[in-house]
Amino acid sequence: MPNEMSLEKLIAGDRAEFARLVDAYSSPIYRLGFKMLGNEQDAEDVLQNTFINALTHLSNFEGRSSIATWLYRIAANEALMMIRKRKPELSLELEAQESETESLEDVKPGVFADWSGLPEDELLSSEGKKLLDTAIGNIPENLRLVFVLRDIEGLSIKETADVLNLSETNVKTRLVRARMYLRERLSRYYAERLQEEER
Amino acid sequence: MNDHIHLKCEELLGSLSAYIDGDLAPALCQELEKHLEGCDNCRVVLNTTKRTIELVHSPVERSELPADVRERLFKRLNLDDYLTAKSGPQSQ
């Protein structure tokens, strides 16, 4: 939380302070909703529900975690609830925690083209950006949530573990799998581009 | 270059991510770097994974909240009075 924000004022119901909290965290929470649900309307629902929920329960906030962790936790739960409504069959997979296998078998690299030297303006062209967004959107949900918090929003492994109530080991495992999955998807595409350039 | 990875590579694969984050124990770090010297495929996986993470960290992935979404959010929270100026952490 930004240093100058007062937890006491927030808990006491200070509206100006709550408005500052909303401005400080609405962008990352909207991004989280968008990355998890894949469309603007659902992202906005996650955003609104998160802050309505926060406003309702702020007076009971005990400070056992930071306010940022608490907000991200509400947002992650909102996003997961919406995904479960859409795909009830995913529930068990999303809730699998410590029992999750650490096997990397399903994300083992299969493409070994080195596209890392391609110029930035090609990788971040509108086509490259679209490819990246689609690939992120295809990461399995239980891995994607970890990936969004850690690699897009920049939370530490510990903070991510606290938000999702997972062990740090489990967060690391999911992060490796998400990164490998994404690398493979981008590699398949850019390997073809490199081959075309060689022709 | 072979189009598959060996058992040793598979064992080290899980460490690449922590290595990129600078979060790998020194002994494992040394083992990994020694392996990377002689393994083209693992070097490619390392380079492309690093690049993937850099792309994700780029500003295009960190878009700000659209103004109309902010406005609807503030109205929903009955914070209309605070809509005019962005009440971010820097402002008083």
Image (spheres, rainbow, N blue to C red):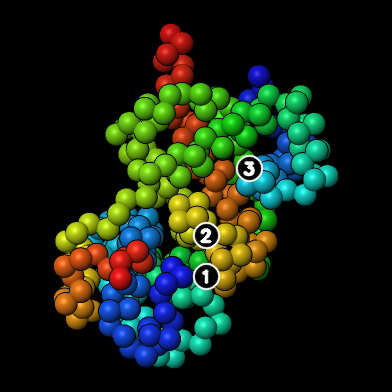
Question: Based on the displayed image, in which of its 4 quarters is residue A82 positioned?
Answer: bottom left
Q: Is residue B4 above or below residue B76?
A: above
User: Is there a contact, CB below 8 Å, between mark 2 and mark 1?
Assistant: yes
Q: Which residue does the numbered mark 2 point to in the structure image?
A: A155
Pointer 1 indicates a residue of which chain?
A
Residue that appears at 61% across and 28% down: B44
Disc 3 marks which amino acid? Ile
Please tell me how crowded label 3 is: few (under 14), some (14-19), or many (20+) other residues with Cα within 10 Å: some
Compute the Cα span from label 3 to label 2: 16 Å
In percent of width and height, residue A63 lies at: 52, 83
Q: Residue pushed farthest top?
A: A199
Q: Is residue B51 above or below residue B17?
A: above
Q: State whether discs 1 and 3 lie on one chain.
A: no
Q: Is residue A118 above or below residue A76?
A: above
In percent of width and height, residue A136 lies at: 42, 47
Q: Is residue A195 visible?
A: yes
In what element is the residue under mark 3? helix
Q: Which residue does the numbered mark 1 point to in the structure image?
A: A163
Numbered tag placed on residue B20 in the rendering: 3
Question: Based on the displayed image, in which of its 4 quarters is residue B71 positioned?
Answer: bottom left
Pointer 3 indicates a residue of which chain?
B
Residue that appears at 68% across and 24% down: B40
In the drawing, does residue A94 fall left or right of residue B10? left
Pointer 2 indicates a residue of which chain?
A
Compute the Cα span from label 2 to label 1: 10 Å
